[in-house]
Amino acid sequence: QGIQFGADLTKLDPKLSASEILRAIVEPSHEINKDYQTYRFLMTDGKSYSGLIVEDAAKTLKIVENPLVQVDPLVINKDDIDSQTKASKSLMPEGLLDRLSEHEVMDLIAFVLARGRRENELYQSGASH
């Protein structure tokens, strides 16, 4: 089983509007959820790493540099970190909607707003975009 590195689209905050959800998809770096924030680490030996912290222990951090690759997290000794900064870019790439038709984008927004529940009124016959 892999590591979750993005929000479950069926469990988003119910207060989010369609426009807020669309903005998060179109501009993923506009506001990065703290649970999915990546960091850049400059080490005392001059090496640098960038990744998502998946475990923060007393003396070590475990980070995933590329969540799409199935490898064990990299273990970093905290004493070896010279600096740690938040990355300004989201793990979620920009341009995800570029290959979708307008209808597919509307279906995606409907799915997210319905929280994936088929019984939602957005899926009832006659519902239109």
Image: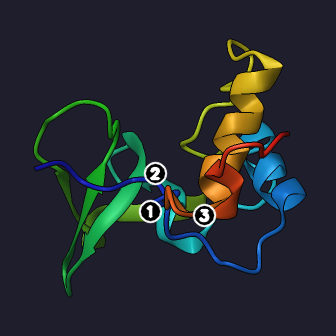
How many labels were placed on the picture? 3
- The reply, left or right, for residue 115 in relation to residue 82 is right
Three-letter residue code for mark 1: Asp
Looking at the picture, tell me which residue is in the foreground, 103 or 43: 103
Disc 3 residue crowd, few under 14, some 14–19, many 20+, Cα 10 Å: few
Looking at the image, is mark 2 or mark 3 nearer the viewer? Answer: 3
Residue at the (28%, 63%) spot, across then down: 80
Q: Position of residue 47 (x, y in %)?
A: 36, 40
What residue sits right under mark 1 in the picture? 82
Q: State whether residue 60 is above or below residue 68.
A: below
- Which residue sits furthest front? 125
Q: State whether residue 20 is above or below residue 60.
A: above
Whether residues under marks 1 and 2 lie with C-beta atoms below 8 angstroms apart, the answer is: yes
- The reply, left or right, for residue 125 in relation to residue 34 is right
- Which residue sits furthest bottom? 58
Residue at the (19%, 80%) spot, across then down: 59
Looking at the picture, tell me which residue is in the foreground, 38 or 26: 26
What residue sits right under mark 3 in the picture? 120
Q: Secondary structure at mark 3?
A: loop
Q: State whether residue 104 is above or below residue 60.
A: above
State whether residue 74 appears in this view: yes
Precedes in sequence: disc 2 or disc 3:
2
Disc 1 residue crowd, few under 14, some 14–19, many 20+, Cα 10 Å: some
Residue at the (39%, 53%) spot, across then down: 5
State whether residue 87 appears in this view: no
The quadrant where residue 56 appears: bottom left
What residue sits right under mark 2 in the picture? 42
Looking at the picture, tell me which residue is in the foreground, 108 or 24: 108
Looking at the image, is mark 1 or mark 3 nearer the viewer? Answer: 3
- The reply, left or right, for residue 16 in relation to residue 78 is right
Three-letter residue code for mark 2: Leu
